[in-house]
Amino acid sequence: MVINNGDNLDSVFSLAHHNDTIYIKNGTYTAIPEAYCESVCGNCLEPFTEVNTTVGFFIKDKALFIIGENRDSTILITSAGYGVLFSGCNGAYLSNLTITGGRRSADGRATDAGIVVKNGRVTIENVVVRDNTDRIDTVVVGIGGIFGREGGELIISNCIITNNGWDGIALYRGASAYIADNIIEKGRGAGIGITWDASAIILRNFVSDYWKGIGSFGNSSVIVMNNAIYDNLGWGLIATGNSYMKAINNVIYHNGNCGFAVWESTATGIFSNNIVAGNGWKEEWVCPCVGIWMNGIPENFAIRFNNFWNNKAGNYLGMSDRTNVDGNISANPVFTDDTKFRLKAGSPCIDAGDTLLIDLDNTRSDMGIYGGPMARIQTQHK
């Protein structure tokens, strides 16, 4: 079905049938928010805590294929805490439109976001989630970008999440996600936060201008590969709690405090082929101004084939200097610029990565975001 500007989109979603395809023509569609009470809290210590918020557009118990005419000109103003809520939707698809204009709920326990997914599988592709900045003085948290809740399975790709009031992407209890090729920028909280027992594969995203970059918390499990994490106020990348993190071929550059931190002794993982450079420009806030802060057990986190360079208070803290050990180096990576992080010809990071990882041109892996098997664009130096 084709929806024209001026049609009641709330009614369309309510009356649509499972597997319907809805094409939304260019225009501005404003939701009429409704009260929404949850019996399960996504981010409370006691999960069976009642939470009250509002919902803008509600898709429940059916897989709809929702496609806008133009990403920047098909605009959904949600006027609610949960802007677009998918609940019980197995196989839903949302693409080619903008989500904006959320209103923060007074209940600080509500996981307000432009898009919220619960108990179902949803693909979100080529969507802009922007300017959900409404805040209440008595509530610290704002409105995030895209949040996964219990039973949510999300595929988030080629989206722009910008200028929102809380985390860019967050996963809570029982959620999982594939997060790839997104721009996540200009918000409060963390760019990407994986919490409780959630799991995620995080590939080739650009995360910048948040309080904090990418973090694994609780009992979560994450794979973080080929991401650029830069210009955040606090830490760039963090593993804490009982979480497991596999971090390979990332650039962690010019974050305010530490580049990478293992926050607790119970966090485990692998840190390889990364470039950690120029961090520590802000007065210490959430962690020391170093390249890596090992506040855990070094034997629980393999640190191999990385370049730690020019971090304000030193490259290593809480562990021995690993320069020239296990393939780690300390040298100017020689980027072509500080936004795309390509390596110039002659960079010491070229062909200096893990010998077991292969670049797209079938040579030994480079360090940084254009190295290794999960890169999608070859650098120009080869």
Image: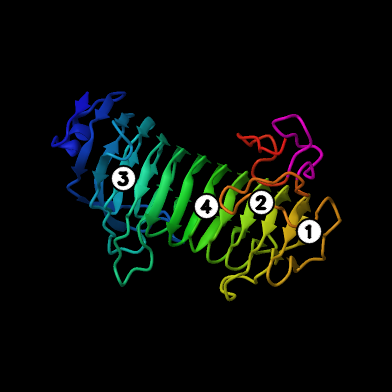
- Tell me which residue sits at (65%, 41%) in the image: 370
CA gap, disc 2 and disc 1:
14 Å
Tell me residue 223's x, y (percent).
62, 44
Q: Image quadrant for the C terminus?
A: top right
Tell me residue 137's x, y (percent).
30, 72
**Colouring rule applied to residues:** rainbow
Closer to the chain start, of discs 1 and 3, is 3
Q: Nearer the viewer, mark 4 or mark 1?
A: 1
Closer to the chain start, of discs 4 and 1, is 4
Closer to the chain start, of discs 4 and 3, is 3
Q: Nearer the viewer, mark 2 or mark 3?
A: 2
Disc 2 secondary structure class: loop
- 10 Å neighbourhood of mark 3: few (<14), some, or many (≥20)? many
Which image quadrant for residue 17?
Answer: top left
Amino acid under disc 3: Ile
Q: Which mark is residue 269?
A: none
Tell me residue 147's x, y (percent).
41, 48
Amino acid under disc 1: Ser
Closer to the chain start, of discs 4 and 2, is 4
Residue at the spot of label 3: 99
CA gap, disc 2 and disc 3:
35 Å
Residue at the spot of label 4: 207
CA gap, disc 1 and disc 3:
43 Å
Q: Answer above or below: position of 113 versus 290.
A: above
Tell me residue 133's x, y (percent).
32, 59
Q: Which mark is residue 335?
A: 2
Tell me which segment is drawn in magenta: 350-366
Q: Which mark is residue 330?
A: 1
Residue 194 is at least partly visible in this image: no
Amino acid under disc 4: Val
Is residue 354 toward the left or the right of residue 92 in the image? right
